[in-house]
Amino acid sequence: MANFFETRMFKPTACIALLMLTQCYAYVECDIKPPETSSSQFYGHPNTAMSNEIGILNATQIECMQLCRKDARCLAFTYAADTQECATFDQDSVTGPEHMETVSGVWFYDMQGKNLTQSYFKTCQTSNGCRNGGSCINDCSDLGYSCACPKQFYGRFCENEFIHEYVFKTNIVGISSRSNTAFTYKNNHYLVIAGFEGVSESLTKVYKYSNTDDVYEYHQELTGTSAVGKLEKFIINGQLYIFAANYKSYGLTDYIRNSYLYKFNTQTGLFEQHQTFSTQAGNDASYLEFDTNHYLLVVNHYGTAYGIYSEVYKWDFASSQFIADYSIQGYGAFSGKLFAVDGTLYAVIVNYYDDAAGGHAVKSQVWRIKEKRRYIGYFIDQHNRAMTGATVQSGSMTIDYCLDYCSGQGSPYSGVQLSSHCFCGTAYSTYGESADSECNRVCAGNPHEKCGASWRNSVYHTAGSKGLIQSLDESNAGSTGIDIFTNDGDTYLVVVNHLSCVQNTIVYIWDASTDEFKIHQRIPLEHCPISTTVFKVGGEVFMIVPTFRKLWIYTNVDADLFTTTSPIFKLEGTMFVKYGAMTSHSCYGITFFERDGEYFLGQSNQRNGIDGTKTDPSFNIYQWV
């Protein structure tokens, strides 16, 4: 019989010999926690055994425990130390007491609390609870599988049918916030609420969901956060990060301050500061993975003037940090978004105010960040180089590094060679073409890309220039909010105008013939719309527009001024139509998230609904049903 640790790496649908049974399983590999960090509980009964075992093998006690935890069928196991015999059972002392018996030298263990990362075998086939046509998918959850529901159903087992309404679920009182994010990581559910500026300083707080109590429980604070404009969560190479854009220092008019990238420590279960960014009223952030690279846009709103630059950063695999890649001129930039169309990377910057010219009439803009790569082929090189232009060698070499370098040299072609070399030129095929299969050296600066080989160039057309490609029509009324989404093959952009509290929100659609956005729909709004969130659920597309206050100019601060209705729209065909509304209290941001097959909206409010002050505002969670 193979040792347990020799059999834990299985290929999907592989036939394996396990527990003296040979079967073909659909396999899902998950990390197995070591015993000292396991959340499982084991209840031992001395001199007790059970009949009707599902498997027997020789193993250590720890291996026996891990084997039971790994098998979704296993509810209990026995272990005899003198013979090192391990037996597993699909019943425990509660469900199968009639099978228990007294046997000297054998310990019997009930297994409870299997909600941890583990491996499962054939769970979909043995315990599929999916309903209403849901498809079973083996995974690493506490059940060992999840259900992919038809679009009209939701729930962990696809047991509920959508009626497309929101209902109040719960709230967390005491945090004045502009931004929040909620996500699942390694089978745990987290909620992060960014403190902004209430009656006292409030750091950004992380909450962890308790399945037992059905509540989010306080977990930790993110040190260094104060008046956060935006949170952005993302995963790079399996590692979880959160970026917090700090708008200012609490109680001060100090807008030039650091923002931070936090990394999740899987050993402690806590977020830790990983990288520091110099920002100026950091108000938004946008992450996007593009061409095996990772980009982060950080939007700066104000320094000592509104005409300042926002920054696009690119992930450096060698240092596991972001490095500055491109600066974008902004004018009181309030928000921004990275997006890709047809292999080209773009950024939209929503400009709010130009104190040098135009004021709120400044337009929002679209910038090209990275043009679509145009690969030519794989070509032979010799000592008398085939590409005779400029050359550079770098331990951070990537395809984009070489493309940008040769573009700056004015060369039409770029060639990467032997992981770290870049050649530019007006020709590349002097010695003929080679097979692509010979391109086998990973790039020094990105292990997910290939950069030629010895005396072999991977050749590309040099990238087009970065820069401004469009100023958006009718985005010149103090724009503040943005979202981008795709539907039925089309790319849409939504820009929220804020000036005077009564403005059109503009929906644009991408025109592939001009590589620009054109106006598609105008939606008249009131109550000072400030941002927008588009979400897809149950086969439908919805948009909610958070609103800030009822009047642009006011004298009295009261609950009525800041109690507004944030409208909800539904996409019918290609046009949004009014669908409903949600009561808000100076709401800046609403996020949409999923948890165990159910869907929720997290609403960040800056003020309370009692007297309109910043004392004890309510962060609200609504369930979408």
Image: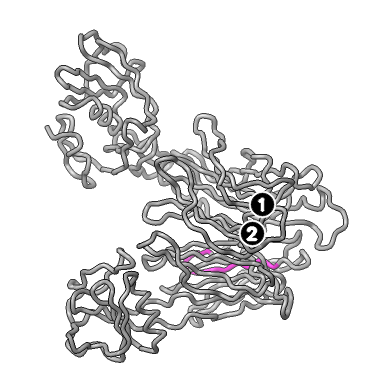
Residue 618 rendering spot, x and y as whole percentages:
69, 43
Which quarter of the rendering shows the N terminus?
Answer: top left
| Amino acid carrying mark 1 in the image | Phe
Residue 174 rendering spot, x and y as whole percentages:
68, 41
Q: Residue at x 17, y 39 (%)?
A: 6
Specify the quadrant of the image occupied by residue 421. bottom left
Whether residue 380 sits left or right of residue 391 in the image: it is: left
Q: Is residue 594 above or below residue 47?
A: below
Query: Does the magenta run of residues contain 42?
Result: no
Q: Residue at x 55, y 68 (%)?
A: 492
Q: Nearer the viewer, residue 624 or 193?
A: 193
Which of the two labelled residues, at mark 1 and mark 2, occupies the earlier sequence position? Answer: 1
Within 10 Å of disc 2 (Cα), the crowding (few <14, some 14-19, many 20+) is many
Which region is colored magenta? Answer: 485-497
Per the image, the residue denoted by label 1 is: 196
Residue 323 rendering spot, x and y as whole percentages:
45, 67
Per the image, the residue denoted by label 2 is: 247
Residue 512 rendering spot, x and y as whole percentages:
48, 78
| Amino acid carrying mark 2 in the image | Tyr
Image mark for residue 341: none
SS under mark 1: loop
